[in-house]
Image: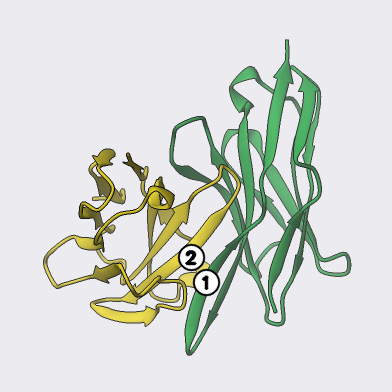
Chain colours: A green, B yellow
């Protein structure tokens, strides 16, 4: 079975400080993992993806994530938060096999940025 | 085009009326997924297509929901006799063949309000 757990429902950081959004996954197959961001009343935007190439993945807007198989984790980080980063972030695992396909969403982490 | 186009952006229907949502995937993407976001942090898988063929429909409420992806037409999701609990944002995503290496591009969603 496949699942995604986002460990924090809400993270609040000060502008200019580092951001850490945590994600753990469970998958019977080699997973593909993604982080998406959703600003209020907007659609989902792909931040970055891991697809069994480099374990450290760089994405847009200064975000990056590291795939750690031993810890089954794919945490999202950014060295310095900006006010525009305030949004909902979703960790997603992709499962694709012959008879079905699914994108499984984590429960989301709301990122707030304090001035 | 390089975006997944969903129309309309907003749709309001009286209970019992029909609702039809459209999704134009990115050209060359052969997989299409429909998701329902009821609560902010909950995405429910509905159905996926590989070209015009249903690939996985395990999430579809069969009684009132139907979907199609016909050649040279936008994909559609239709809800017959809408109910209040159908109020949600419906997202469409598309992906290239060999999708695990490419990720999913989401549309901006259709917000359905049933009154």
Which residue is outermost to the front?
B16
Which is more toward the observer, B15 or B34?
Answer: B15
* Residue shown at the point (18%, 60%) measured from the top left: B74
Asked if badge 2 and badge 1 are on a common chain, one would say no
Viewer-nearest of discs 2 and 1: 2
Q: Position of residue A98 (x, y in %)?
A: 48, 89
The answer to whether the residue labelled 2 contacts the one labelled 1, judged by CB atoms less than 8 Å apart, is yes
* Residue shown at the point (26%, 48%) measured from the top left: B5
In the rendered view, does B46 fall on the left or right side of A93? left
Q: Position of residue A74 (x, y in %)?
A: 75, 56
Q: Which mark is residue B45?
A: 2
The residue wearing badge 1 is A102
What's the chain of the residue with tag 2?
A: B
* Residue shown at the point (43%, 51%) measured from the top left: B85
* Count of residue discs: 2
Which is more toward the observer, B22 or A74?
Answer: B22
User: Callout 1: 10 Å neighbours few (<14), some, many (20+)?
Assistant: some
- The answer to which image quadrant residue B57 occupies is bottom left
């Amino acid at each position: 079975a496949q699942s995604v757990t986002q460990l924090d429902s809400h993270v609040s950081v000060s502008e200019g400080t580092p951001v850490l959004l945590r994600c753990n996954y469970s998958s019977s197959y080699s997973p593909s993992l993604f982080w998406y961001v959703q600003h209020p009343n907007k659609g989902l935007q792909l931040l970055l993806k891991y697809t069994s190439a480099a374990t450290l993945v760089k994405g847009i807007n200064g975000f990056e994530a590291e795939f750690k198989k031993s810890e089954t984790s794919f945490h999202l980080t950014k060295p310095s938060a900006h006010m525009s980063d305030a949004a909902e972030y979703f960790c997603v695992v992709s499962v694709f096999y012959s008879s079905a396909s699914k994108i499984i969403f984590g429960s989301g982490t709301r990122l707030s940025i304090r001035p | 085009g390089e975006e997944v186009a969903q129309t309309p952006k907003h749709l309001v229907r009286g209970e019992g009326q029909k609702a039809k949502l459209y999704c134009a995937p990115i050209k060359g993407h052969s997989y299409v997924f429909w998701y329902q976001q009821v609560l902010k942090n909950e995405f429910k898988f509905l159905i996926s297509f590989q070209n015009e063929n249903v690939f996985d429909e395990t999430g579809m409420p069969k009684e009132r929901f139907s979907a199609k992806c016909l050649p040279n037409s936008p994909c559609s999701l239709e809800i017959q006799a809408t109910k209040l609990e159908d109020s949600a944002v419906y997202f469409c995503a598309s992906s290239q063949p060999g999708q695990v290496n490419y990720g999913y591009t989401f549309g901006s969603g259709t917000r359905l309000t049933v009154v």
